[in-house]
Image (spheres, rainbow, N blue to C red):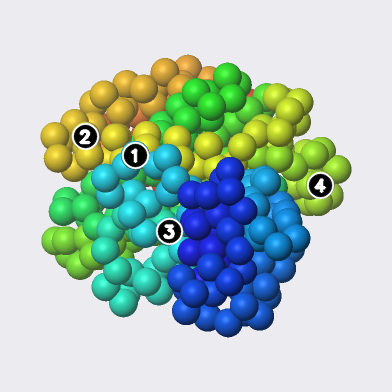
Amino acid sequence: MKDKIIQILKENSKNPVSGEKLSEYLKVSRTAIWKHINQLRQEGYEIESLPSRGYLLKNTPDVLSSIEIQSGLKTHILGNKIIHFDSIDSTNEKAKEYALQGEKEGLVITAEEQTKGKGRKGRDWISSKGSGIWMSILLRPDIAPCQAPKFTLLAAVAVAKSIQEETGLLVHIKWPNDIILNKKKVCGILTEMNAELDRINYIVVGIGINVNQQENDFSEEIKNKAISLFEVKKSKISRQNLTRRILTNLEKYYLNFVKKEDFSSILKEWKELSCNLEKEVKVVLNGKEIEGIAKDITEDGALLIENREGKLIEICYGDVSVRGIYDY
Ligand code: BTX
């Protein structure tokens, strides 16, 4: 209902719409309209009440709601359906629930705040209210499950490019799933999959970006490794514009990969954006440390490390530290 009211007010941006007209059109009482208008005001919509003329929308807040993101979104699949939550445990968990109910690919779950945002291996992802992009995208690619790790790389390229295009800031990718700005983590990507031996049922790509937090907004626990776009750009960034750009770029890379089976161009861009290659790295894998120089990334998205003995080791997953970048 609130979305419908906003849509009508947007379509009549120059002319006030009376409560009577809204209630007739939407077939609800004028009291119900009034309640919804008040709720919208609480959510940050600036709606003027002009005596005996009606409601006029003066300003929209930077929320990640379906109506705001979809207006101006030119994708074919991603974002066809967007479900927005003011507060939720984890957008990835919600997307997986919808996936199990048979929801089509392209569904996007967005939230203003996550109370149990997830990182990898049960780690937390701190997702404070209204300041970041916390979203998950449901995909159902017709490819073999062993190809799934490529989605994290693909998403990282799409997000890094989108941040650069939208803000002009130079970001890098730290294998496999971090986006780095000024040597700190500005974004994390969590890809989760449900598959059988030979086919993927669904993939959920969860993207968390620190957008408009100020330095003091980060808790003690993460303030040495986390950074927001605002801190470097020194001006507020539209979460709506950045979200639309990410969905557009992600769809482009996704379709190139699944329809044209072209991963090599994504890999090339990944390498250009990487902060790992030719750097000294340390990988912690099942509690064991491997040190060496990151030499390359394979077609399957694994990291190739040359160890101290000059032997090449292929790392498919694990936590990588790069000298000089936060936890190393
Ligand atoms: P990760 O395991 O690589 O990173 C998690 C680690 O990053 C934490 O242990 C903490 O040290 C640090 N950290 C936590 N919060 C932040 C933050 N806001 N900024 C920078 N560093 C932080 C990375 O996992 C994958 C994160 C994906 C998050 C998205 S948000 C939407 C979707 N829903 C969901 O529950 N997760 C994904």
Mark number, residue 74: 1
Of residues 325 and 179, the one drawn nearer to the viewer in this rendering = 179
266 in relation to 19, above or below = above
Instruction: Kindly identify the residue that appears in the image at 45 percent across and 27 percent down.
Output: 161
Labels 3 and 2: the sequence-earlier one = 3
Q: Is residue 314 left or right of residue 170?
A: left
Q: CA distance from mark 1 to mark 3?
A: 14 Å
Could you tell which of marks 4 and 2 lies nearer the N-terminus?
Answer: 4
Distance between mark 3 and mark 4 Cα atoms: 28 Å
Query: What's under tag 1, amino acid-wise?
Result: Lys
Mark closer to the chain start, 3 or 4? 3
With 137 as the anchor, is 200 left or right in this view?
A: left
Q: Can you give x and y, in whole percent of width and height, for residue 297 in the image? A: 35, 29
Q: Amino acid at mark 4?
A: Asp
Q: For label 3, count other residues whose C-alpha is less than 10 Å away and answer few (under 14), some (14-19) or many (20+).
A: many
Identify whether 295 is placed above or below 118. Answer: above
Residue name at image x 21 percent, y 53 percent: 141
Residue contact between numbered discs 3 and 4, judged by CB atoms under 8 Å: no
Q: Amino acid at mark 3?
A: Ile
In the depicted view, which residue is nearer to us: 28 or 295?
Answer: 28
Give, as a three-letter code, the residue at label 2. Answer: Asn
Residue designated by label 4: 217
Can you see residue 285? Answer: no
Direction from residue 77 to residue 41 in the image, left or right: right
| Label number found at residue 82 | 3
The residue identified by callout 2 is 256
Furthest residue to the front? Answer: 52
- Tell me if mark 1 has few (under 14), some (14-19) or many (20+) residues whose alpha carbon lies within 10 angstroms of its own: some
